Image (spheres, helix red, strand yellow):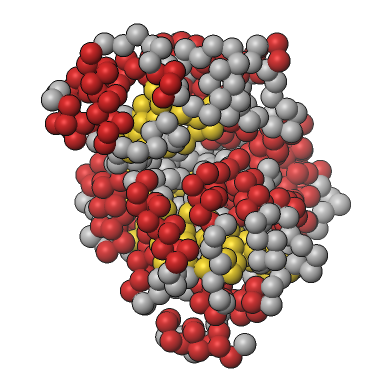
Amino acid sequence: MDSIHTILKKFWGYDSFRPLQEDIIKSVITGHDTLGLMPTGGGKSITFQVPAIALDGICIVITPLIALMKDQVDNLKDKGILAEAIYSGKSKNDITRILDNCILGDYKFLYVSPERLTTDNFLLKVKQMKVSMIAVDESHCISQWGYDFRPSYLKISDLRLYFPNVPVLALTATATPDVVRDIQEKLAFRPGANVYKKSFYRKNLAYVVKYTDDKLGMMTNILNKVPGTSVVYVRNREKTKEIAEYLKGKGIPADFYHAGLSNETKDLRQNAWKSGQCRVIVATNAFGMGIDKPDVRTVIHIDLPDSLEAYFQEAGRAGRDGEKAYAVLLYSDADGTKLKKRISDTYPDKDFIKIVYNSLFNYFQIAENEGLGLTYPFSIVNFCKIFHFNITQTESALELIQQAGYIELHEDTDNQSRFVFCVTRDDLYLYKTTDIEDNIMCTIMRCYSGVFCDYVYIDENYIAEYSGQTREIVYQTLVELRQKGIINYIPLKKEPCITIQRGRIDLKYFSIPKQVYEVRKAQFMNKINKVVDYATDKVHCRSRILLNYFGDDSSSDCGQCDNCLSRKKTPVNPQNHTFIRERIVQSLKAAGNTMDLNILLNQTTNIEETPLKQTLKWMLDNNELVININGEIELLEKN
C-alpha cells in the first residue's frame, strides 16, 4: 500500500491522508465494494482518485453534478492525469471521440451522468474498456429513502453485469441508517463489502435557529455582525433576486443564483462568489453541489428545507476551513404551516396525476400504444397554460409519473439540435411530402450518416446553406415533418425534454405503485415533521439532534448552538427542563393563561424551587412567557 502514499504526495502534495480516506482506499484496492460516508468538504474525491491511479485501467465516475465533472477533470488534467467527462452540450462526435480515447488511450477517469448509462452508444463502448473501478458520487440519490431520489441511479447496477469483479465505491455526505442499507442493496454490493463512516460532528460549526417575523432584518443583522462570505438559501427563484437587491440596497455585495439562469450566467456568478468579488450569494437549492469554497462563514436559511438531509448538506457548506462558522435557520410561526402544505403540492391527488398523464400524451399528440422511445421538447409553462394546471402540482405529478416508469424527464442543454427519422428509408417514399420537405430531408441524408438509426446532431444554418433555403424555412419544415410523424426533431433551446418510456396506455390501466406514492408520501411527511421539530425545539442540542438523525447516538452536546448557550444560562438538564416547562404551560392554560407567580410556585410544590425558577427565567428569555402590567406571569398564545 506504499504506492497510494506516493501517489498522494506526487499529485496532491500531502504527506498523509485525512481520517477515513486511507481505510476506504485500501478497501477498494483490495477489491471490496465500499460505501464511504463523509461530511461535505471531507475529501471524498481523493478516495476514488488515488486508487484509480494505482489500479490498472479506467475508473468510471458517475455523478449528477456537471460543475463537479468539469472542475475535477480540469484539476486532474492540470496534474497530468488523463481524464474526460461526458455531459449534455457535447456533440455525438465528441462523445464518440471521448469514448474511443477511453478504449484506446491511457485514460484513468471517465465522468458521466447516470442518465448516460442507458444510451446504446455508451454501453457498446464501455464494454470495450478496461474498467478498474466504478465510483458513484451522491449515492444517496439511489435510495427511495434519500432526499434526492433519482430513478436514473437505479440503472447503475446494470453496469455491474458487464464488470462483475470490479469494485464499486459509493460516496455520500448524508445518509440515515435506512439509506445506508438501501444504497448497498440497489448497487448490488457483494459479500464482504465495507462501510466506513466519518463522524458528521463539526466542532467549528454552530447551528442556530432565530425566531423572528422580520427575516430580512435579522439576516442583515447577522451579515453585519459576522464578516466574510455567505450563502443565503430561499425556496423560490423570485425571492433570490428580491433578496439580493435588498442586500445591495443595504450596502452588502450580493447576487442571486437559480437553475433558470443560463450556464454562462451561473458560471460568472459562481466564480465571482468563489473569488470574493461577491460576498453573498442568494440561491435556491440548485447552488452549492460540487462547489468547494472553504471560507464560508455563514449559511442562512430564510425558508425551511424539505428535509434534515438537505439542511445538513446545505448548512455544511459553512466553515470547511475549520474556522468558526454559523448555520442559521430563520423561523417564524407561519413556516411550519407553509412547509406542511408542501405535502399536498409534492403528492397531489392520484386522480390529478392520471389527468396529467392523459393530458401529456394529448399534448404530444401520441395515440394509444404509440410513443415508446421518442423524445419531445417540453415546456411545462406552456403545458400548464393549455390545460389550466397548477405548475407546482404538475411538476410533482410528472415526477411521480417518471418514478412509476412511464416517462423520463431531463434538462436538454445540448448546444446542437437533434434529428432522427421515425420511419424506414423504404417507408419514407410512401408519405406525401412537399418539394421543400424533400429537399431538406435529402440534404440531411447527404450531410449526416446514421439518421435512420439514432439521433444525430444537426446544424440548421449548414442545412439552410446546403439546401438553398433560409434557416427559418428549415426550422419550420422540420417541425412540420415532426408533426406528420416522419421525423423526431429536437431544436436548439434550453428546455426540458421528455422521453416516453412506455407507450401510451388506456387510463384504466394507468396506476402509480404504492411504493412510489403512499410509501414515499409517508416518508416525505415524516421528513417534514422532523424539520419542523428541529426548528421548534428550544431545549436539545441542535448538533446532537442532527447527528442522532443520521444514526450517531454517541455525540455529546456541542455547547455552542442557541439551545446549548441558552441552557448555560439555565443549568437544568434537558429532561427536567422539558418536564418542568410542560407543567408550567399546563398550569397556566388551566388558569386562563395568566397566574400570579406565588400561586404558580404553590401549584408546583413537587418541583424544586431552583430548577423551577431557572426554567421560568428561560421561558421569559425565550419569549414563551411575559410579565404583564399586573405583575402576573402570562403565557404567550403560540404555546
* The residue positioned farthest toward the front in the image shown: 426
Residue 359 or 352: which is nearer the viewer?
359
Question: What residue appears at the point 76 percent right and 62 percent down from the top-left corner?
Answer: 190
Percent from the top left, x then y, of residue 438? 27, 18
Residue 172 or 450: which is nearer the viewer?
450
Percent from the top left, x then y, of residue 323? 44, 73
Q: Is residue 476 visible?
A: no
Q: Is residue 415 above or below residue 41?
A: above
Locate residue 401: give its quadrant: top right
Quarter of the figure with the N terminus: bottom right
**Left or right of 316 on screen, residue 495:** left
**Left or right of 195 on screen, residue 65:** left
Quarter of the figure with the C terminus: top right
Residue 584 or 202: which is nearer the viewer?
202
**Left or right of 200 on screen, residue 238:** left
Percent from the top left, x then y, of residue 297? 40, 63
Q: Is residue 107 above or below residue 506?
A: below
Question: What residue appears at the point 60 percent right and 16 percent down from the top-left corner?
Answer: 369
